[in-house]
Amino acid sequence: MKFVPCTKTVKLIDSGPTGAKARALRITAGISLRDMAKRMNFTPAYVSDLECGKRNWSKSLVEKYERALNRHA
């Protein structure tokens, strides 16, 4: 899998992860974008938008992302 960096600047929401940090954590965990989307019950496009900073992170989204990262497949 090739890592393609996002080009948009991502802002921090509270002390939660930025989209770039979230993406790096997902890739390090060996979770594909599609699998993450399934775990979160979102579309891959929505998760990609979060990771690339095209959508804002809310506290509940950060928590949902963290749960999906920690859930064993």
Image (cartoon, grey):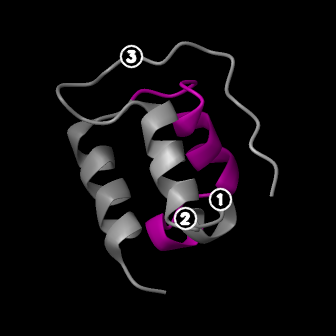
- Give me the C-alpha separation between circle 2 and circle 3: 21 Å
Q: Quadrant of the N terminus?
A: bottom right
Residue visible at 36% across and 78% down in the picture = 71
Q: Please give the label number shown on residue 13.
A: none
Assess whether residue 58 is covered by the magenta stretch: no
Residue type of the residue flagged with mark 1? Leu
Q: Please give the label number shown on residue 36.
A: 2
Q: Quadrant of residue 3?
A: top right
Residue type of the residue flagged with mark 2? Met
Residue visible at 45% across and 65% down in the picture = 40
- Find residue 67 and report its horizontal and vertical position in percent: 30, 66
Tag 3 secondary structure:
loop
The residue furthest left is 14
Which residue is disc 1 drawn over? 33
Which residue is disc 3 drawn over? 11
Q: Are marks 1 and 3 in contact (CB under 8 Å)?
A: no
Residue 52 is left or right of residue 61, and the answer is: right
The residue furthest top is 9
Q: Are marks 2 and 1 in contact (CB under 8 Å)?
A: yes
Q: Quadrant of residue 22?
A: top left
Q: Which residue range is magenta in the image?
A: 38-56
The residue furthest front is 28
- Give me the C-alpha separation between circle 2 and circle 1: 5 Å
